[in-house]
Image: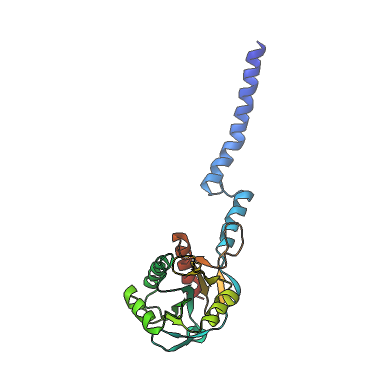
Amino acid sequence: MLKNKSYIGVSFIILIFGIYAVPKIIDRIQNNEIVKGDRLDKVSNSSKENLEIIKIGLAPKFELVNHDNAKISNETYKNKVYILEFFFTSCPSICPKMNQSMLQIEKTFFGNPNFGIVSISIDPVHDIPEVLKAHRELLGVKSSNWNFLTGDKAYIYDLANKGFNVYVGENHKVKGGFEHSGLFALIDKKGNIRCRKDDYGNPILYYDGLDKKGVRDIQQDIAILLKE
């Protein structure tokens, strides 16, 4: 007898809950409010913040000669969005992959006069203008806004290591004789280095030119900066 009363009591509570709560749940679903809790809102807002393209500071000035032996400087890219890398033509390791990533980016923005690419050799003794020109042709580069640059070795190393804080150096123990990263710097129309944030809200500083995600991210951010 007591058991029956307990079942009746529990059933009555469930019935009352159903009458009170179910219509509210249905109403929230119909109004797309079912996923708008405070915790989820914070996750959503955090994701949007991570996509912000923040300013790191002004990119260092430079002046070098290109594959046509013409002087090229940061002023050449004034009012343009451009990306910059350090590489060398005889690189047996990461440079071919970097080249392919750059070609993909060039193709995406080909014909846009407000976008450019700068590739600076860290082996200027070998990579004279004629060598850079041949390398450019071998890659099949089409954009007139993609310059391959060379110049004084000490100047270039200071530009990389002290200017952009991107390590380059000689190391005769590694294949090719030089060390460098596969990072791409993104510079906006006003000469600022720009980047997005990582999943933890920290600036990534530079984009990984060896990684599909890095290449995809920089293309997304170039498109945004071109609209600014």
Q: Is residue 63 visible?
A: yes
Q: Residue at x 58, y 74 (%)?
A: 161
Q: Position of residue 5 (x, y in %)?
A: 65, 16
Pick the front one: 111 or 16: 111
Residue at the far top in the pictured view: 1
Residue 190 can be seen, yes or no: no
Considering every residue shown, the one lying at the far front of the view is 173
Q: Give the vertical position of 81 relative to 100 (above or below).
A: below
Residue 134's image quarter? bottom left
Q: Position of residue 91 (x, y in %)?
A: 42, 69
Q: Does 76 sit left or right of 201 as displayed?
A: left
What residue occupies the far right of the structure in this picture?
2
- Quarter of the N terminus within the rendering: top right
In the image shown, does 167 or 45 lie closer to the viewer? 167
Tally of numbered discs: 0
Q: Is residue 93 above or below residue 66?
A: above
Q: Residue at x 62, y 32 (%)?
A: 17
The x, y position of residue 216, in whole percent, is 45, 63
At horizontal 57% and vertical 67% (from top left) the residue drawn is: 205
Q: How is the image coloured?
A: rainbow
Q: Quadrant of residue 20?
A: top right
Relative image position of residue 179 (x, y in whole percent): 50, 68
